[in-house]
Amino acid sequence: MSLSADDVAKIAHLARLAVEPRESEALGRELSSILDLVAQMDAVDTADVPPMAHPLEMAQRLRADVVTEEDRRERYQAHAPAVENGLFLVPKVLE
């Protein structure tokens, strides 16, 4: 696919990029090669390829769901200027 200078200008405008006219030709070639690569990947038949989250077959290591720290909420809130029902109260920022 070959992009014209007008195509590059439109893409730059949509991407909110400032592209100098002297850079337009080189950028057009680079974008065209990227679009050619995407077209090549799109042509590959992936109908029999199962979707995967990770390319390696790995089981995720999980840790035991146990409490590792004691509850210190009351100690932390003892120094707070305002607390209600176990929550820190803060001044309203938006009106």
Image (spheres, rainbow, N blue to C red):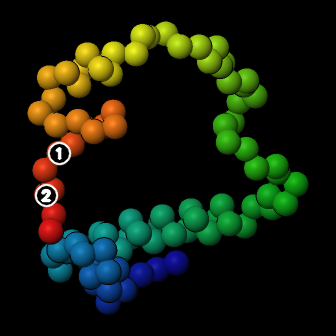
Label 1 or label 2, whichever lies nearer to me, is 1
- Do tag 1 and tag 2 residues touch (Cβ < 8 Å)? yes
Q: Secondary structure at mark 1?
A: loop
Residue 40 locus on image (x, y percent)? 65, 64
Q: Residue at x 71, y 30 (%)?
A: 56
Residue 91 locus on image (x, y percent)? 13, 50
Characterize the local packing of mark 1: few (<14), some (14-19) or many (20 or more) Cα atoms within 10 angstroms: few
Q: Which mark is residue 53?
A: none
- The one nearer the camera, 55 or 6, is 55
- Give the farthest residue toward the right: 48
- The one nearer the camera, 31 or 78, is 78
Q: Residue at x 59, y 13 (%)?
A: 66
- Give the farthest residue toward the bottom: 6
**Which residue carries the number 2 mark?**
93
Type of amino acid under label 2: Val
Q: Which mark is residue 90?
A: 1
Instruction: Determine the image quadrant of residue 22.
Output: bottom left
